[in-house]
Image: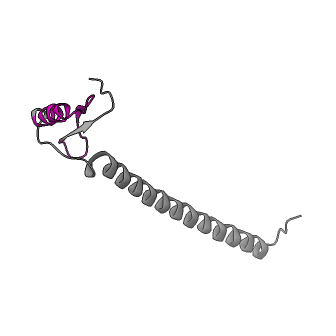
Amino acid sequence: MASHKRSARQRQQAAFAAQANDMDDIFAREDRRRQRLDERKDAVRRRKACSSKNRYASQAEAKAAIADCEAHGTRGLSCYRCTYCNGWHLTSHPWRD
């Protein structure tokens, strides 16, 4: 049974407030952890989708590169506009317009 004394109630409230502050810190740390994780994921996606590929300034240049590849035996390439660099890249995956 809880005490009805004012001092006991104040101690209980102080203990509860301290726990609440600890929870705020836990949530803040979790938010920072998730933000760092999202930044890492975005960097990996950018590298895989853009930075590690040849960039062409226009669709015509990309299609010319596809024609050169076909002349050397590589078939099934298509090009797409990159959302990161706004340039054009080649892919071997079927591309739907």
| Residue 78 falls within the magenta-colored stretch | yes
Q: Position of residue 29 (x, y in %)?
A: 52, 65
Q: Which residues are magenta?
A: 61-87
How many badges with numbers are in the image? 0
Q: 18 or 94, which lies in front?
A: 94
Q: Quadrant of the C terminus?
A: top left
Picture residue at 28% right of the left edge, 51% below the top = 52
Picture residue at 24% right of the left edge, 37% below the top = 90
Picture residue at 26% right of the left edge, 52% below the top = 51
Q: Position of residue 58 (x, y in %)?
A: 11, 37
Quarter occupied by residue 87: top left
Q: 58 or 34, which lies in front?
A: 58
| Residue 82 falls within the magenta-colored stretch | yes
Residue that protrudes farthest toward the right in the picture:
1
| Left or right placement of residue 18 versus residue 79 in this view | right
Residue 59's place in the image compared with 28, above or below, is: above
Q: Position of residue 68 (x, y in %)?
A: 14, 35
Residue 20's place in the image compared with 78, above or below, is: below
Quarter occupied by residue 7: bottom right
